[in-house]
Amino acid sequence: MQIYHTMTPVHTAQGCAVALGYFDGVHCGHRMVLGSAVRYAAENGLTPAAFTFELPGNQTLKGGRILSPVQKHIRIESLGIEQYLEPPFEAFRDLSPEDFVQKVLVDCFRAKAVFCGKNFTFGARAAGDVEMLHALCEPRGISVHIVPMAQYGAQAVSSTRIRAALEEGRLDDANAMLGAPYAIDWTVTHGKGVGTSRLGTPTVNQNYPPDALQPCTGVYLTRILLDGHWWPAATGIGRRPTVDDSANAAVTCETYVPDFSGNLYGQNPVLEFHRYFCPVRKFRTLQELSDLIHRAARESKDYFAAQTVK
């Protein structure tokens, strides 16, 4: 997938079928929009493309990022998108709906078809809706395809619902709506060495950046991609009350990977969350905490041994 970070014409000899949206989380609804554009492109000799944008600084839409930019790109590429335009929001935020269609869809994509959900808006101050999109595109020979909203639990799938599920520890619901396991790839940093020196469980520390959504604190059954291989793991997100009960203790994300040893500092391994195991709590002794970590690790190994996850 070729990624463009400026408002520039993409490479296409025949024109594009373009998926439109922010695609935060690349959830089931987003996958339907992106997949529809890919299928239409294949059937009509077009280039499958997507238009989205990057928000300035640490700003996010309706809450923190669900996925890192890298994970977002990987998931979108896996659906078959070949040309991906992601300019800064400021680059087009002041365009009128008419200018958006001309400068983005026509000038950048040579669009022949566009795909979006029924709640899609565009142009300065969201002045354009899907009815206006039809009215502006059809005279230019661009067909407009409104993709039905994906449903989960008799309600439309949305990034807002996914954030709520993650924040409440409902990982099964979040993963079902995402269409793939929730995952992070934050940089591995140095911790305080408690796992290695006092618990016998050295951990991979991948603490959340300020602009990312942080899931419910607790212990999770996870798997981590190291050296091209998936390893069962146990991950704790929380303030570690057993080893640091101060009021201003930092929230950490620490992963114990049984059977693995190696220097991962500065790397960005992918960590997938598959099951919520238990809440974080304060133990009377470090041995009790160590026992929990080892128990969660065993549960993780058993869980993945019984799965057909690839």
Image: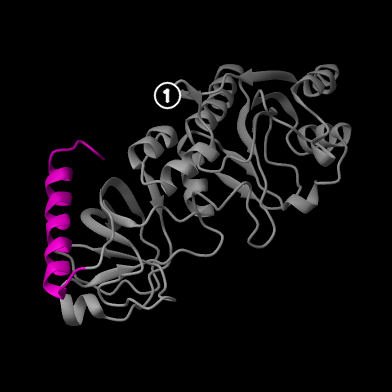
The quarter of the picture where the C terminus appears is: top left
Query: Tag 1: Cα neighbours inside 10 Å, few (<14), some, or many (≥20)?
Result: few
Q: Where's residue 45, x and y in %? A: 61, 21
Residue, disc 1: 153
Q: Residue at x 56, y 17 (%)?
A: 43
Of 56 and 294, which appears nearest the observer? 294
**Residue 297, quarter of the rendered image:** bottom left
Region rendered in magenta = 283-310
Q: Where's residue 67, x and y in %? A: 49, 50
Of 29 and 51, which appears nearest the observer? 29
Q: Secondary structure at mark 1?
A: loop
**Residue 81 in the figure: left or right of residue 276:** right
Q: Residue at x 79, y 51 (%)?
A: 91
**Amino acid of disc 1:** Gly
What secondary structure do most residues of the magenta stretch adopt? Answer: helix
The quarter of the picture where the N terminus appears is: top right
Q: Where's residue 14, x and y in %? A: 69, 27
Of 193 and 82, which appears nearest the observer? 193
Residue 304 in magenta stretch: yes
**Residue 38, quarter of the rendered image:** top right
Q: Residue at x 58, y 50 (%)?
A: 63
